[in-house]
Image (spheres, grey):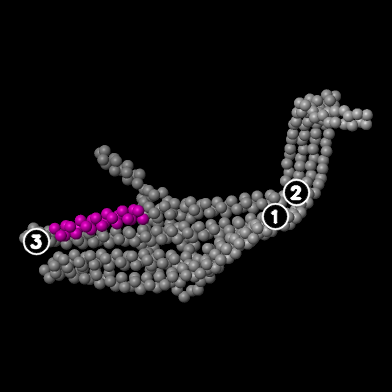
Amino acid sequence: MALFGVAVMQAQVTPAPQTVTLKDAVNYALQNKAEAAKARLDVENSEYQIQEVRAQALPNISADGNLTYNPILQLNAVNFGQGTQLLAFGQKWNSLGGVNLTQKIFDQSVFTGLQAARTTREFYQVNAKLTEEQVIERVANNYYQVYVQRQKLVLIDSTYKNTEKIRNIIKGQFDAGLARKIDLDRMNVNLNNIETQRQQILNAVELQENALKFYMGMPINTPITLPKTDFEVKPIALNESLDVTQRTEYQLLKKQEKLYYYNKKAQIAAYYPTLSLTAGYNYIGQGPELPWFKKPSDGVYWSDYSSIGVNLHIPIFSGFGTRAKVRQADIELRKTAEDIKDTQLSLDMAFENAKTQITNNLITIKSQKENVQLAKEVLENTQNNYQQGLATLTDLLDAETSHIEAQNNYTAALLDYKLAEVQLIKAKGELQTLKN
């Protein structure tokens, strides 16, 4: 009863496996993986960066207050013509409060900063797209690798059943005195080896599934299963040309180039004059005691004053510091241009390599599929011949090993094809289609 209760509780706690298609895995990762979430936050943060730069072009208003106590007033020497006397000016207490405004009328760096901030937003938007594509690529690659490991598990299970069936036949023959003990021992050893291989594949499946869940951002203890339809070999058009400008990597570099261009303009802006408006209104109280809430009858007097001014700053000579900054910014701009040219070559190479891999893998898949069928026929014929005494146990074991090897080679060829397919989709800039 207790054991039954524990089993029931475990059954209730263990969730049912989720069937996960490639589309499901990709969309789950885009919603839950940290990299994708952080990229979206960068896009959101770029809006605040724009607001920060825009604030420099808006009026800056502040309210200020001050309270000063002068225990000892400064004495000033005053010449009255008949002699010099030391007189104290000011009051023991001073209280000042006012409102001040500063407004930039012309500042080239602010205008350039606004343009750069908008480009920064576009940069983060493209970067978020690139991050999504990187997440999709990792998920797709690991998804297909999980499928391959599971196919190996299906194959090893089938092989174990067939080998066990033959072992039982030999055991029956041995019990009847028609087979040698060494043949039975060899079959038992073979079964043990297959069981060991099965355990290794089970471990590989679990490790690969954990890697897939990690790249999806899914809790590791969530059981999943993959449908077989996701591993079909579908025809792919290989006569298309590549438009590098549609690749996210290229677009990101172009945005970076634009940012460096505005950085250069920001450095050049240091040559321009700046013009700003200032205005202020203040109220001051002075007296021999704390001025707050006091009147002239208490010896405290309050008065107001205001000012409006225009500040003009014209840079004349900065010790060639501005020129050095402009040239450094120009170097960064030229380096980015070189990166763009190198990236174009890299993307062209990746596209051509992906097409070549697809073509070669299709040939390999066809060859391995025929090889699997041939190995299967050889194994079936050898099993029949062995049961009729026309083949040795060694022939049977060799045929079984060849069949397993052919199946594994075929499965590996399928994996290579699907991985090459992902690279071709990436090279065409169409990874986003995997989430649709």
Q: Does the segment drawn in magenta span residue 205?
A: yes
Predominant SS along the magenta part: helix
Give the image location of residue 348, x and y in percent. Answer: 49, 70
Name of the residue lying farthest toward the top = 298
Identified at 54% across, 53% down, the residue is: 40
Give the image location of residue 204, x and y in percent. Answer: 32, 55
Q: Which of marks 2 and 1 is nearer the N terminus?
A: 2
Identified at 61% across, 56% down, the residue is: 120
Residue identifier under label 3: 180
The kind of secondary structure element at disc 2 is: strand
Residue identifier under label 1: 319
In the displayed structure image, the side of residue 147 where residue 330 appears, left or right: right
Residue type at mark 1? Gly
Give the image location of residue 293, x and y in percent. Answer: 78, 27
Residue type at mark 2? Gln
- Is residue 167 visible in the rendered structure shown here? no
Foreground residue among 219 and 401: 401
The kind of secondary structure element at disc 3 is: loop
For mark 1, does the 10 Å Cα neighbourhood hold few (<14), some (14 to 19), or many (20 or more) residues?
A: few
Image mark for residue 103: 2
Name of the residue lying farthest toward the left = 177
Foreground residue among 36 and 165: 36
Identified at 12% across, 61% down, the residue is: 183
For mark 3, does the 10 Å Cα neighbourhood hold few (<14), some (14 to 19), or many (20 or more) residues?
A: few
In the displayed structure image, the side of residue 137 where residue 330 appears, left or right: right
Give the image location of residue 107, x and y in percent. Answer: 73, 54
The segment highlighted magenta reads 185-208
The kind of secondary structure element at disc 1 is: loop
